[in-house]
Amino acid sequence: MKRSIIPIAAALAVGLGALASSGAARAEAAVKVTAARAILPGSTSVPHDVITYEESMPNGALIGSGLTMLGASYIPSMIVAASSDHPGDMALYVPVAGPWMNLAERDSGCPGGRCDNDAANKVLLVADGVFQGLGTLQILGGFLFPTTRTVTQVAGVHVLPSVTAHDVSLTATGRF
């Protein structure tokens, strides 16, 4: 039984390595800044500086869905680990690797090294391990594949007259 888990673990490791290498290339994207001078419509002929740049941030939707998937599969594992008397179920406290460790030790307490009535538990362990692994990959993917947005900032100075009972002056306000 232990030999069947090794190809699965190797496939997960290869997938994670491919995900990390492709994400590193995208994470190196530099912030591109362009500047221009423009006269905005409705303004008083004072030129304004317009700065446009791209901003990268972690992909919140991907991280959120990964946390949901990981939590939805890990919380039942912890409940089973806390309520079960099977010695292999203590491995379910370990996230992501726990279901695979439990699956490897599942038949060790049975006569002849094979439990006949444990097929449903093994299927649930495989599903639990797959969902925990996919949730973890989604969380990592949220950081390796960030979202980008274009930000445009307008800088300008407005000079307005200010009249009070005792004073006449000019007031300058600006946004940079």
Image (cartoon, grey):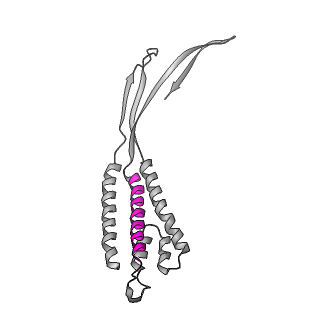
Task: Provide residue 126's location: percent of width, then percent of height.
Answer: 39, 69
Q: Residue at (50%, 27%) from the top-left corner?
A: 175
Q: Residue at (46%, 26%) from the top-left corner?
A: 155
Task: Provide residue 99's location: percent of width, then percent of height.
Answer: 43, 71
Residue 113 magenta-highlighted: no
Which residue appears farthest toward the front when viewing the image? 117
Task: Provide residue 48's location: percent of width, then percent of height.
Answer: 43, 23
Rendering quarter of residue 115: bottom left
**In the image, is residue 13 above or below residue 49?**
below
**In the image, is residue 80 above or below residue 174?**
below
Q: Quarter holding the N terminus?
A: bottom left
Would you say 14 lies left or right of 172 here?
left
Which residue appears farthest toward the right when viewing the image? 165
How many discs mark residues in the rendered view? 0
Q: Residue at (39%, 48%) from the top-left corner?
A: 146
Observer able to see residue 172: yes
Q: Residue at (51%, 64%) from the top-left corner?
A: 75
In the image, 162 versus 14, the foreground residue is 14
**In the image, is residue 104 above or below residue 15?**
below
In the image, 149 versus 40, the foreground residue is 149
Which residue appears farthest toward the bottom when viewing the image? 112
Which SS type dominates the magenta stretch? Answer: helix
Observer able to see residue 97: no
In the image, 122 versus 93, the foreground residue is 122
Residue 140 magenta-highlighted: yes
Task: Provide residue 128's location: percent of width, then percent of height.
Answer: 42, 66
Rendering quarter of residue 38: top left
| Stretch of the chain drawn in magenta | 114-142
